[in-house]
Amino acid sequence: MTNTSPKFRIGNGYDIHRLVVGRKLIIAGVLLKHPDNLGLDGHSDADVLTHSIMDALLGALSLGDIGKYFPPSDDKWKDANSLFLLSEVIQLIRNEGWEVNNIDSVVVAERPKIKPYLELMKRNISNTLKIDESLIGIKATTNEKLGPEGREEGISCHSVVLLEKKE
């Protein structure tokens, strides 16, 4: 048996943040308006979509998670723009010789409706990663009033990425 390195690596990511009064609601760099003026609580901007993509990217190469690189204990990352953090993560991935083949994500939220913003979210992720928008899938769903998302206690996101080794 020969020892060959894999050409593809897959990673998944998950993030959830609590909805609170007094915070902005930012997803993939898009400022949304919650009907009850709620936003996502977190050390950075609490962008669940971008965070789940970052964890999927890092996980694909066994590089840890975003807390390893941007710990909430470090005030340097307080209120940080998650698209900037994503640009740092993709540089780590590329430095290891890998490129994004595709990304698929699903945002889980009862309100506000995410669908009207999906194309802008894709564009923001695409511009940050410097990849074609056709390589990015973003979907939105509710939790049918079940769980923390359904009770509007928070918003979550699941992401999967496929990385391909550059020749």
Image (spheres, grey):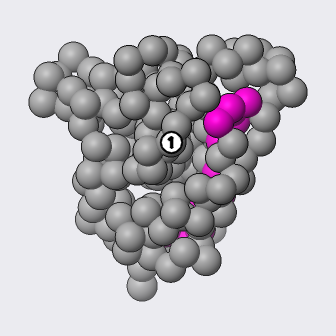
Q: Is residue 124 above or below residue 84?
A: below
Q: Is residue 150 above or below residue 111?
A: above
Q: Residue furthest bottom?
A: 167
Decide which of 95, 114 is in the foreground and name it. Answer: 114
Residue 91 covered by magenta stretch? no
Span highlighted in magenta in the image? 99-112
Q: Is residue 122 left or right of residue 88?
A: right
Q: Residue furthest right?
A: 144
Query: What residue is shown at x 61% (from left), y 77% (from top)?
Result: 134
The amino acid sitting under disc 1 is: Leu
Tally of numbered discs: 1
| Residue 41 percent across, percent down from the top left | 42, 20
Q: Secondary structure at mark 1?
A: strand
Query: What residue is shown at x 28% (from left), y 43% (from top)?
Result: 81
Q: Is residue 8 above or below residue 143?
A: below
Residue 104 covered by magenta stretch? yes
Image quarter (top left, top right, bottom left or bottom right) of the N terminus: bottom right
Q: Is residue 7 left or right of residue 63?
A: right
Is most of the magenta stretch helix, strand or loop?
A: strand
Q: Is residue 155 left or right of residue 21?
A: right
Mark 1 Cα within 10 Å, few/some/many (few <14, many 20+)?
some
Does residue 3 appear in the picture of this structure?
Answer: no
Image quarter (top left, top right, bottom left or bottom right) of the C terminus: bottom left
Which residue is disc 1 drawn over? 32
| Residue 82 percent across, percent down from the top left | 34, 44
Decide which of 33, 68 is in the foreground and name it. Answer: 33
Decide which of 3, 138 is in the foreground and name it. Answer: 138
| Residue 129 percent across, percent down from the top left | 39, 66
